[in-house]
Structure formats: structure tokens, C-alpha cells
Image: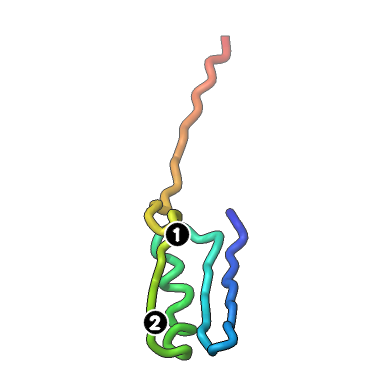
Amino acid sequence: MAQQAIKFTIKQDGTVLEEVSGVVGNDCMKITESIEKSLGTSVYIEPKPEFYQTNTTENVTLQHNQN
């Protein structure tokens, strides 16, 4: 599992940029929900490619023939 991180950049005009990494699908929205409420209204959201991926786990069964 990749390390999850949230990076904040505060610009001189007070604008806060938030970037989430290591998260697949819309889990980033769940992780940052409470923080975003504290920061106020979001002006712009730009999803990364990972946002459109699904968070699935593949179950694989391996069969070995012992002759």
C-alpha cells in the first residue's frame, strides 16, 4: 500500500492549495472533508488521474500440479 500524504501550500494572497497523494478513487475527498470545512469554500477542484481509478483488490488463486 502506498504512503498517503496531504500537502498544503499557502500562497502569499492566503489561498490554500491542497494536494493528496497515495490515494485511489474518491477516498481523497473523504480524507480531506473535515479539513476543507475548516478552510472554507473550495474555489476549484482538479482531480488527479488516480481519482478515476477504482480501489479494488484482486483475489488470485494459484494452482500447482505436483506430478
Where the C terminus falls, by quadrant? top right
Q: Residue 42: which disc?
A: 2
Indicate the amino acid at tag 1.
Lys
Where the N terminus falls, by quadrant? bottom right
Residue located at (45% from left, 47% from top)? 57
The answer to whether 52 is drawn above or below residue 20 in the figure is above
Say what secondary structure mark 1 lies in.
Answer: loop
Q: In this view, does 53 lie to the left or right of 2?
A: left
Indicate the amino acid at tag 2.
Ser
Q: Position of residue 16 (x, y in %)?
A: 52, 82
Q: Residue 67: which disc?
A: none
Residue located at (44% from left, 40% from top)? 59
Residue located at (51% from left, 85% from top)? 15
Q: Nearer the viewer, residue 31 or 19?
A: 19
What is the crowding at mark 1: few (fewer than 14 residues within 10 Å), some, or many (at least 20)? few
In this picture the colour scheme is rainbow
Q: Position of residue 8 (x, y in %)?
A: 58, 77
Query: Residue 11: which quarter of the image?
Result: bottom right
- Mark 2–mark 1 Cα distance, whole angstroms, equals 16 Å
What is the crowding at mark 2: few (fewer than 14 residues within 10 Å), some, or many (at least 20)? few
The residue tagged 1 is 48
